[in-house]
Amino acid sequence: MSVDLEQNYYLGSDLNAKISISDTCLLIGVNPRYEGSKLNLKLRSRYLEGNFEVIQIGSLVNLTFSSTNISNNTKILKSLVEGNNLFCQKFVNSSNAVLISNTEIFKRKDSFGLKNLLNFLTKYINLFSQSNSQNRLSIINPSLNSVGFTNFNNLKVIKSKDLRNATGIFFYK
């Protein structure tokens, strides 16, 4: 089994194209409104086009579009993989289902089991789906610490001249 996360899971540039042709999206522990603003805009615009359903596993969050929250318990993944859930039909009958999660699931103690469940879920969606394309789990990385400080080190010190010429100051936490 491969443990190379970059090879198996990524929020790639082709995700926009996949969302454009998809009719179902499964968000696993993700709040795209706060964790990925570009992703949220893409999901919202696709939802407004019609014939697109967003299904969530995780906390109830207020997205900028309608979605169906099926549980905040990870045991729901097991029932999806086993085929014992009503939403299994959604994935089987969907065209190009999109699965999106975040890096926080890999910080859990049961992350190995969750990774296996997600692998089986994508495998079975690909096996039974009526679409010819291969689905992959896309991972969003919301924190600067997880990404690294490469770009952070390029920031320069604020000088008094900058403050005099500024029309506004924004502080990011």
Image: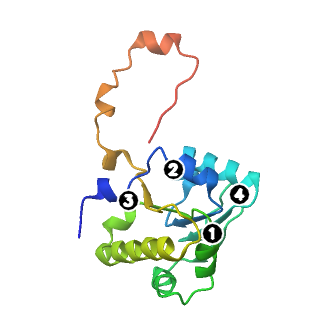
Measured in 3D between alpha carbons, the distance from the residue under mark 1 to the one under mark 3, in whole angstroms, is 26 Å
Which residue, given by chain and number where applicable, does mark 4 sit on? 65
Discs 3, 2 touching: Cβ within 8 Å: no
* Amino acid, disc 2: Leu
- Residue 60 image offset from top left, x and y in percent: 61, 69
* Amino acid, disc 3: Thr
- Residue 64 image offset from top left, x and y in percent: 69, 54
Give the mark nearest the N terminus, 1 or 2.
2
Q: Quadrant of residue 110?
A: bottom left
Residue 103, which numbered label? 3
Which residue, given by chain and number where applicable, does mark 1 sit on? 94
* Amino acid, disc 4: Phe
| Residue in the foreground of this view, choosing between 118 and 22 | 22
Give the mark nearest the N terminus, 1 or 3.
1
Give the mark nearest the N terminus, 3 or 2.
2
Measured in 3D between alpha carbons, the distance from the residue under mark 1 to the one under mark 2, in whole angstroms, is 16 Å
Measured in 3D between alpha carbons, the distance from the residue under mark 4 to the one under mark 2, in whole angstroms, is 19 Å
Q: Residue at x 57, y 22 (%)?
A: 168
Q: Residues within 10 Å of mark 3 (few under 14, many from 20)?
A: some
* Amino acid, disc 1: Ser
Which residue, given by chain and number where applicable, does mark 2 sit on? 15
Residue 132, which numbered label? none
160 left or right of 41 in image = left
Give the mark nearest the N terminus, 4 or 2.
2
